[in-house]
Image (cartoon, rainbow, N blue to C red):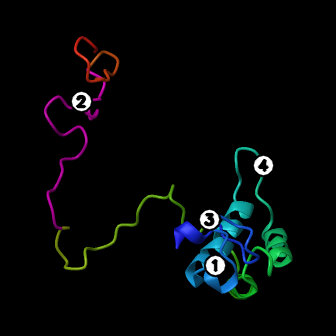
Amino acid sequence: MILHHHERLDGRGYPYGLKGAQIPECARVVAVADAFDAMTSTRSYRRARPVPAAVAELRKCAGKQFDPRMVRALAAALERHGWHPDLITSADPAPDLPHPTGGPPPGPQLPAPGSHRGGSGAPRGRHAAPRGGRARHHSGRSGDA
């Protein structure tokens, strides 16, 4: 599915130049969603477009770049439910949800940061910076530190 989401309905996409129904339906859904997300997200080189402008651009490209059915479905969902990008973001802390079995999650329980001996909470390991120094990267050659 991800492989084909840059294909275009008119056959001018990539990587294979698939056309129309040759493009898997799920890839046609992702193509519209990906374009909408790209247009309505602020990037380092430009500000986010307003949702109506993004939908207008998708409609303009429907039939050439995007499947018109998928564009209509997104537009209908936006009209029905609105767009709430700030509802939940990856920057929000994860909600405290009870484990489905009622007990602790399976697997090893890791100590809280800073609760181990040494107490700094800093990551330790092959590429971690030694206390009071810079990180060392081993290149595989003897004599390198």
Question: Camera-side residue: 29 or 36?
Answer: 29
Nearer mark to the viewer, of 3 and 4: 4
Read off the residue under disc 3.
86
Which type of secondary structure does the marked residue at label 2 adopt? loop
Closer to the N terminus: mark 3 or mark 4?
4
Instruction: Tell whether label 4 touches label 2 (CB within 8 Å).
Output: no
Nearer mark to the viewer, of 4 and 1: 1
Separation of residues labelled 1 and 2 (CA atoms): 44 Å
* Residue 115 in the image, given as x and y percentages of width and height: 18, 40
Magenta-span inclusion, residue 44: no
Read off the residue under disc 4.
46
Closer to the N terminus: mark 4 or mark 1?
1
Separation of residues labelled 3 and 4 (CA atoms): 19 Å
The image shows residue 120, relative to residue 100, as above or below, that is above
The image shows residue 92, relative to residue 114, as above or below, that is below
Please name the amino acid that badge 1 sits on.
Answer: Arg
Read off the residue under disc 2.
126
Please name the amino acid that badge 3 sits on.
Answer: Asp
Instruction: Tell whether label 1 touches label 4 (CB within 8 Å).
Output: no
Separation of residues labelled 3 and 1 (CA atoms): 25 Å
Q: Residue at x 26, y 18 (%)?
A: 141
Closer to the N terminus: mark 3 or mark 1?
1
* Residue 36 in the image, given as x and y percentages of width and height: 71, 69
Closer to the N terminus: mark 1 or mark 2?
1
Give residue 28's mark: 1
Q: Residue at x 32, y 23 (%)?
A: 137
State the image quarter where residue 130 is shown: top left
Closer to the N terminus: mark 2 or mark 3?
3
Which type of secondary structure does the marked residue at label 1 adopt? helix
Looking at the rendered image, the quarter that the C terminus falls into is top left
Question: Which region of the structure is painted magenta?
Answer: 106-130
* Residue 144 in the image, given as x and y percentages of width and height: 28, 14
